[in-house]
Image (cartoon, helix red, strand yellow):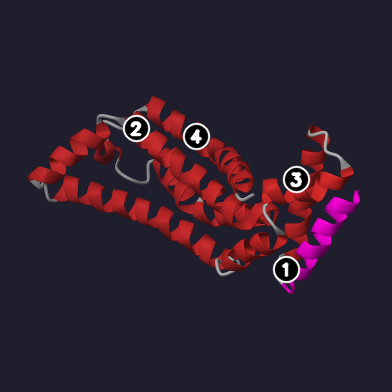
Amino acid sequence: MTTGDKRFFQELDQVLGKHPEKQEIIAEYRSHVYELLREEDIQDANVYDEIVKRLGTPEEIAAIWKDEAKVTPKKMQLLFVVLNVLIFLGGIVLTIVYNVYHIEWIEVLWKRITAVPSIIIMVYMAFWGLLGYEIGKEFGSGGLTILRRTFTYAVIPNLVLMYLIVFKLIPHEWFQPLLSGRFILVCILLTIMLYPISWIGYRWGRKASV
């Protein structure tokens, strides 16, 4: 450790004060400083200035993390769980209204949606990627546990629906022309891919947080 990065982390430790994620934040920035010093040929006398140039001053970093501390893990988990439940409820309501009440504009909407299943899948994958990205951006290296817990809660509706469909506990004809064997297989495979997609989003968001 050079004099420059030692000074940087001493100041960062001081300005973070009693921040609840202080150790995780410092560890996060140590990894970034390590990568910076490894990739760049910086003279010892210029290390502090180069770190500040790339990452910001300790005061600026502390200000960012103190603002982000207002976003609690429980609030983040609740947000994405509720969003996923709302997506499912919206789909359920649309399906029931289409099959029971035969409202003209609902029928038009249904036909347009079911005509492009690939777009439905892409949008839903983007949702899970966004989940990981936002957690990585808000919580940095301390967000992986939050991601796992949030994913576990949020994926429950998916698993329940998959169970109902596979064991034909809901009328398959309600979901035509979507519910082909090929589409069911694709959905099962993509459900397996949900966590890796969220993890990739988390890594991306973690980099964006710096």
Residues 138 and 61: in front is 61
- Give the main secondary structure, helix, strand or loop, of the magenta stretch: helix
**Counting other residues with Cα less than 10 Å from the Cα at mark 1, is it few (<14), some (14-19), or many (20 or more)?**
many
Where disc 3 sits, the SS reads helix
Q: CA distance from mark 4 to mark 3?
A: 43 Å
Residue 88 placement (x, y as % from top left): 36, 51
Q: Which amino acid, by three-letter code, is at mark 4?
A: Leu
Q: Which numbered disc, 2 or 4, marks the residue that appears first in the sequence?
A: 2
Give the residue pinned by disc 2.
119
The image quarter in which residue 119 lies: top left
Q: Nearer the viewer, mark 1 or mark 4?
A: 1
Q: Which numbered disc, 2 or 3, marks the residue that appears first in the sequence?
A: 3
As for residue 123 lying within the magenta part, the answer is no
Please provide the residue range marked out in magenta. 1-18
The reply, left or right, for residue 128 in relation to residue 69 is: left
Give the residue pinned by disc 1.
16
Q: Which numbered disc, 2 or 1, marks the residue that appears first in the sequence?
A: 1
**Counting other residues with Cα less than 10 Å from the Cα at mark 4, is it few (<14), some (14-19), or many (20 or more)?**
some
* Marks 1 and 4 in Cβ contact (< 8 Å): no
Q: Nearer the viewer, mark 1 or mark 3?
A: 3
Residue furthest top as drawn? 182
Q: Which amino acid, by three-letter code, is at mark 2?
A: Ile
Residue 136 placement (x, y as % from top left): 60, 50
Residues 12 and 119: in front is 12
Q: Which amino acid, by three-letter code, is at mark 3?
A: Glu
Residue depicted at x 38% and y 41%: 168
Give the residue pinned by disc 4.
190
Q: Which amino acid, by three-letter code, is at mark 1?
A: Leu
Give the residue pinned by disc 3.
50
As for residue 4 lying within the magenta part, the answer is yes
